[in-house]
Structures are given as structure tokens and as C-alpha cells.
Image (cartoon, grey):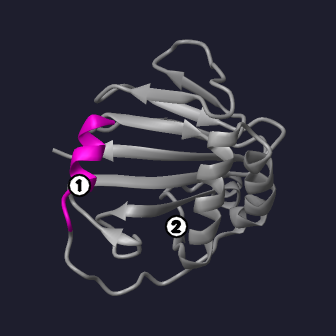
Amino acid sequence: MQRVAAALDRAVADQPPSRPMTQPACAHLSAAIAGAERGPADVARVTTAFRALVPDLHWRLKSITDPTFAAGHANANLLGPYPEALERRDDVWVGVSLMAPEITYPDHNHPPEEVYLALSRGYWRQNTHPWHEPGIGGVVYNPPGITHAMRSGPEPFLAIWCLPID
């Protein structure tokens, strides 16, 4: 998080606004936000700030062909390289993942390390270790290149993620 904070201290040029877009999974966003706002006070504050950004978000799908996954998952970039990010940056990516109940984001890996802040209940797995639930407000750290996955339980899943980019 120190690397993320350092990157965020660097200014970026003015940019055109992103083009808002929703996905089918966004039908679960209000319930996920409401649950997070009932969580610990620090999570509720983060969620209230996030709620203010929702009308401007461009939700996108991962390129996974499973129709259940496509209908139950969406990502939005707050900061990042995508033209749809609220702020375009190449030094740090910050976004949010939303999943409908009972959806698994499949095993994947990537070179940048990653930190998640759980705004709802949800489960994470690294390599072949058992699934674990960090709880609302819990933090999950994925070292660079580790295989990891996440899944929702009976409630919608909402998490913010950060990747410092070298």
C-alpha cells in the first residue's frame, strides 16, 4: 500500500470523463453497497464515498465465456490504463469487483502484486490452499504471480483492489 500511496501522490493530466456503462451483475450493486454500509464504520465511510462514484463508473466484463460468470460479475476501474477508468494512470490501478451471489472468479495470476479490501463477505483462495473469508473490512494480499481466485457466498460480493504497476 505504500507503493500505491506514493503513486497517488503524483499528479496526472486532466482527462476527458469516462463513459458510464452497466452490466447484468450491477443488479446486485445496491444490495452489496447497503450491506457494506451496515459494516464497520471505516468500511461504511469507504462505501459511502464509493457510492458517490457509481453513476460515473464504466462496468466491464472479463473475457470469460461462461454465461453464468458473465451475468454475475463486473469490474470497474477507478484508476488505471483503461479509457473507461475515472482517472487514467499507468503507475497504479485501483478498481472494484462486484459479483452476484454464488459466483466464482476463476483461478488467475498476474505479475503485479495486489491488495483487496473486502466491502462484503466473500472468499479468497491462493494456489491450492483452502478458501478463507477475511470478513467485511478484511484485507487480502496476493504476491506477484500467485494463482488466486475469489467467490461470493449467498450475498453479493463487493471488493476494492489495488495493483501498483512498476
- Residue 8 in the magenta stretch? The answer is yes
Picture layout, residue 25 above or below residue 130: below
- Residue 24 in the magenta stretch? The answer is no
Mark 1 surroundings: few (<14), some (14-19) or many (≥20) residues within 10 A: few
Compute the Cα span from label 2 to label 1.
27 Å
In the image, farthest residue toward the bottom:
16
Q: Position of residue 131 (x, y in %)?
A: 63, 19
Residue at x-position 31% and y-position 34%: 113
Please state which amino acid type lies under the numbered disc 2.
Arg
Residue at x-position 53% and y-position 54%: 96
Residue at x-position 40% and y-position 70%: 85
Give the mark toward the camera: 2 or 1: 1
In what quadrant of the picture does the N terminus appear? top left
Chief secondary structure of the magenta span? Answer: helix
Picture layout, residue 61 above or below residue 143: below
Q: Position of residue 149 (x, y in %)?
A: 53, 32
Residue 79 picture quarter? bottom left
**Which residue is identified by label 2?**
60
Q: Secondary structure at mark 1?
A: loop
In the image, farthest residue toward the left:
166
**Which residue is identified by label 1?**
9
* Residue toward you, 42 or 7: 42
Please report the bounds of the magenta region as a residue range: 1-11
* Residue toward you, 164 or 7: 7
Residue 111 visible from this viewpoint: no
Please state which amino acid type lies under the numbered disc 1.
Asp
Q: Position of residue 74 (x, y in %)?
A: 59, 59
Residue at x-position 21% and y-position 70%: 12
* Residue toward you, 16 or 106: 16
Mark 2 surroundings: few (<14), some (14-19) or many (≥20) residues within 10 A: some
In what quadrant of the picture does the C terminus appear? top left
